[in-house]
Image (cartoon, rainbow, N blue to C red):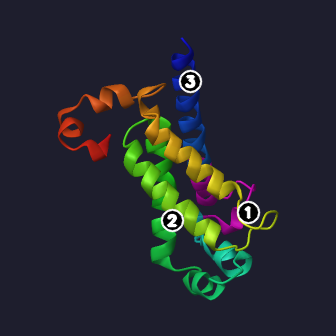
Amino acid sequence: MENKKTNYIWGLLRIVMGWIFLWAFIDKMFGLGFTTVPDKAWLVGGSPTFGFLHFAAYGPFESLFNSMAGSVIVDWLFMLGLLLVGLALALGILTKLATFFGSVMLLLMWSACLPPEHNPLIDEHIIYIIILIGVVMSRAGQYIGLGNRWSNTKLVKKFTIFE
């Protein structure tokens, strides 16, 4: 019984992590006023990466991140990453790929602001990466979502990376 409860907690953590990515996508797309004001929304021509990469980045990689600020390619990769990682995690499908690409995105966000503001090494990005690793290790896509059905498809049985 205890293992079943743990599985559902991991499934819930997977969904919550998916929502974190999806919410960032929605707010940046529509400018709902949380971190993106309406006149800076991607839908009206704003850049979802410019403000953070140009004004918030600091530390040893500041000039690298500043140089990417507002790039159309970076904007598209960022927004597609947020959307696809968020959907995959929320639905419980493609969790291995979503975890890998989500972790890469989080590691890049962490490295844009070094050292972190409130701790010399760890911030929420690192905690989220650890949660994502736990999502894969616990096979959390199998619980509270479509992952169980998805993992039984011929495609996933042949190519387990799609689990």
Q: Is residue 40 magenta?
A: yes
Q: Is residue 84 visible?
A: no
Numbered label attached to residue 78 = 2
Between discs 1 and 2, the one toward the N terminus: 1
**Residue at image coords 59%, 27%:** 9
Q: Is residue 118 visible?
A: yes
Q: Is residue 117 magenta?
A: no
Q: What amino acid is at disc 3?
A: Thr
Q: Where residue 94 appears, x then y in whole percent?
A: 36, 43
Question: Which secondary structure dominates the residues rendered in magenta?
Answer: helix
Q: In the drawing, does residue 24 fall left or right of residue 133? A: right
Is the C-beta separation of discs 3 and 2 under 8 Å?
Answer: no
Q: Please name which of the two marks, 1 or 2, marks the residue nearer to the observer.
A: 2
Q: In the drawing, does residue 42 fall left or right of residue 141? A: right
Q: What amino acid is at disc 2?
A: Phe
The segment highlighted magenta reads 22-41
Q: Where residue 69 appears, x then y in whole percent?
A: 59, 80
**Residue at image coords 57%, 87%:** 67
**Which corner quadrant of the image does residue 1 belong to?**
top right
Residue that badge 3 annotates: 6
Front residue of this view, candidates 119 and 108: 119
Q: What amino acid is at disc 1?
A: Val
**Residue at image coords 29%, 32%:** 151
Residue that badge 1 annotates: 37
Residue 83 vs 53, above or below: the answer is above
Q: Please name which of the two marks, 3 or 2, marks the residue nearer to the observer.
A: 3
